[in-house]
Image: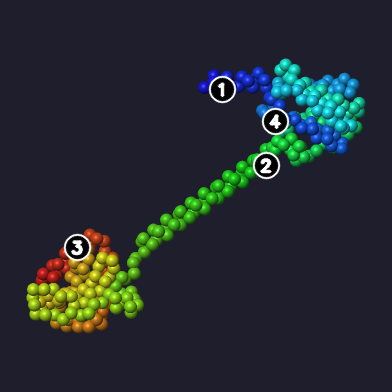
Amino acid sequence: MKIILAILLIPVFLWGSKILSYNVYDRNDRVDVMLTFDTPYEGVLRQNRQENTVVIKLEGATIDAPKIKSINSKYLNKITIAPQGEQIEIVAKISNDVMMQASKTSDSYGLRLRFMNQTVSNSTETSPVDETALTGLPTKSGSEFEQSYYVVIAILLIGIAILFWLKQNIAKRAETIHNEPKAPWLFNKKSSAETQENMTIPIKTTSDTGGVHIRFQKTLDNTNTVAMLDYGTMSYLVILGNNTLLLDKFQDNVPITQNEFETLLQSKHRELDGYFQLAPAAQDEMFDSYKEKASGSY
């Protein structure tokens, strides 16, 4: 892998940075020539002046073909960019009182050659924003990048904290709802329409000892129903569901109307609520005791 990487980097070491484009910006107080490279230019720049000609040599730089441009300016008349072996030679025709300054962009992808009067001080340098606009190579300073990085990290941390808080509260809420004791299922106040839906018309008992007749019934929940059953000369108050549970048995004073049946259920509400609040194992034990009660005398 290292050998392949070295082979791929050989052209970079042999030919260095390549000039992709150049632009000339003619201003009132200067002329800027902006060079754009395909890789950061880290070579050496050398310049030599001979009267009205400035020769700039860029070591470790290449260009596809020579470039010649004439400029109608009092600072720069003509510029030529041509390859010379392993370097580039830039020849600029200038006036006697013009000087040349060279500077790179912060990312080294751009090189600026500025031609201006020698009497102009460095205070006429353009701002970094103007420089970025000219080169077309927008860069961001290190401090701005770090600030943006910290803002993004802070937003992510805040988001994670909010999600964790929501998760904890939802879990606590679910646990609270699960642990809350259920309201008495039998004696909640219901609308008259729902009560009428859950009741049935009383069925008169008969002397036929071979059948079971439902006198009254009332739905308690999805799986349990309380009913008054007539069998022979006896009436039984039972819960029909996962287990058939005998609550009481009657031979006399049997409820005749629905109101009497509701009154009987109200008298049994403590016993019923206690049963449904027990664990399944305890319910089975209570069911066995009721079977023993049913088999004995009342």
Query: Residue 5 — which label?
Result: 1
Residue 152 at what x, y percent from top left? 59, 45
Which of these two is toward me, 128 or 147? 128
Type of amino acid at the residue the image marks with label 2: Glu
Q: Which residue is tagged 4?
A: 109
Can residue 45 be seen? no
User: Circle 1 sits in a helix, a strand or a loop, which is it?
Assistant: helix
Instruction: Say whether residue 150 is left or right of residue 127.
Output: left
Which of these two is toward me, 141 or 204? 204
Position of the C terminus by quadrant: bottom left
Gap in angstroms between the C-alphas marked 1 and 4 = 22 Å
Whichever of callouts 2 and 4 sits on the residue coming sooner in the sequence is 4
Type of amino acid at the residue the image marks with label 1: Leu
Q: How many marks?
A: 4
Q: Which residue is tagged 3?
A: 285
Q: Is residue 4 above or below residue 133?
A: above
